[in-house]
Image: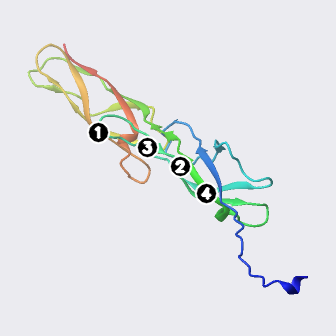
Amino acid sequence: VTSNYDISYTDGTITVTSREIEITTLGEDFTYDAEEHTFTDFEITSEQGLASGHSVVVSASTVYKNVVYDTENVTYTENEFTAVSVTDGVNDVTANYTITYVLAKIKVLPKEATLTADDDEKTYDGTALNAPSTFTVSGLISGHSATAVASGSITDAGTGASTLGNVVIKDSSENNVTSNYDISYTDGTITVT
């Protein structure tokens, strides 16, 4: 009896909403070693995970190398994934996902180094014995070198301190990397007998 009806139609809508996932980036603090570090490990921490057979590919993330300071102390840098895709094994299906991130906070810790001023001595002759300009240094990364200014002077018989200051540490390309070191000092002794 279809012919007895005047039929009109209203279309329905079928909707596939994007799949929401939360990615928590991972990483760990490390001591400065003059090398670039990246951390691409992660966890999916949302209640809803990936669709079956899908996987996340991270091809770029924050690059860490140097110590970062704020106005008071060493601080962290967030590990941000700068190139992320979701694949079904063949096709890129990233557009079907809404991705939010919880970013790891990673510190590059300064490397410890110690500068020790050299000792010097002489027999009294009425002229000043100045602190020697030489010193020893430990804890530097291979290829790095330090310069420092020694201070201290004594004229009369006795002992005084040879101290170091204005330290600059450079890498093999002559870049100033002093801020990547936590420097401690050991004074030397200058002696007039």
Q: Nearer the viewer, mark 1 or mark 3?
A: 1
Instruction: Tell me the element at label 3.
Output: loop
Query: Spatial distance from mark 4 to mark 1, Cα to Cα?
Result: 36 Å
- Nearest the eye: 75 or 169: 75
Q: Nearer the viewer, mark 2 or mark 4?
A: 4
On the image, numbered disc 2 is attached to which residue? 36
- Say which mark, if any, is on residue 100: none
Amino acid at dot 4: Thr
Q: Nearer the viewer, mark 2 or mark 1?
A: 1
Amino acid at dot 1: Thr
Q: Nearer the viewer, mark 4 or mark 1?
A: 4
Query: Spatial distance from mark 3 to mark 2, Cα to Cα?
Result: 16 Å
81 relative position to 190: left or right: right
- Say which mark, if any, is on residue 98: 4
Query: Spatial distance from mark 2 to mark 4, Cα to Cα?
Result: 30 Å
14 relative position to 190: left or right: right
- Nearest the eye: 7 or 171: 7
Residue 59 position in % (x across, y down): 63, 58
Query: Spatial distance from mark 2 to mark 1, Cα to Cα?
Result: 24 Å
Mark earlier in primary sequence (2, 1): 2
Residue 18 position in % (x across, y down): 65, 59
Residue 47 position in % (x across, y down): 67, 42
Mark earlier in primary sequence (4, 1): 1
Query: Spatial distance from mark 4 to mark 3, Cα to Cα?
Result: 46 Å
Asked whether the viewer can see residue 35, the reply is yes
On the image, numbered disc 3 is attached to which residue? 144
Mark earlier in primary sequence (3, 2): 2
On the image, numbered disc 1 is attached to which residue? 71
